[in-house]
Image (cartoon, rainbow, N blue to C red):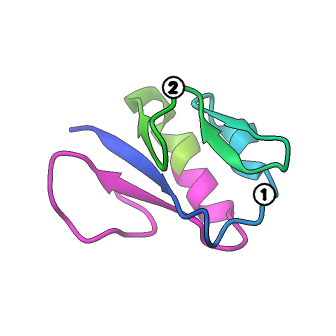
Amino acid sequence: MTHSLHIDWTACRGRGACTELLDGLDRDEWGYPLAVDGSGSNVPVPRRDMAAAREAVALCPLQALSLHRSDAPARPSRATR
């Protein structure tokens, strides 16, 4: 099972906490998160980074992040367990 981190850029204000927690994210010049691999708003999350991804979702002050299971067409949730 794989997961992806969805970034809602309309809700994000570029505070950058998520980019500090996850290796797969970088920041643009305004502080908004960007996928290092260029995958857009749905960033693949390796199994080893799941704890950091959950923390990023929980700490996002504007709820601009959500985790999704990539192998199931499920409704998005704030945290996948």
User: Disc 2 to disc 1, how far (Cα)?
Assistant: 19 Å
Q: Amino acid at mark 1?
A: Gly
In the image, residue 9 above or below residue 71: below
Q: Is residue 30 left or right of residue 20?
A: right
Q: Is residue 30 magenta?
A: no
| Front residue of 2 and 31 | 31
Q: Is 74 one of the magenta-colored residues?
A: yes
Say few, some or many: other residues with alpha carbon within 10 Å of mark 2 (under 14 / 14 to 19 / 20 or more). Answer: few
Q: Which residues are magenta?
A: 54-81
Q: Quadrant of residue 59?
A: bottom right
Q: Position of residue 58 (x, y in %)?
A: 60, 63
**Badge 1 is on which residue?**
14
Q: How many marks?
A: 2
Q: Residue 39 or 62: which is nearer the viewer? A: 39
In the rendered image, which quarter is residue 24 located in?
A: top right
* Disc number placed over residue 37 in the picture, else none: 2
Q: Determine whether, in the image, residue 59 is placed left or right of residue 70.
A: right
Q: Element under label 1?
A: loop
Identify the amino acid type marked 2. Asp
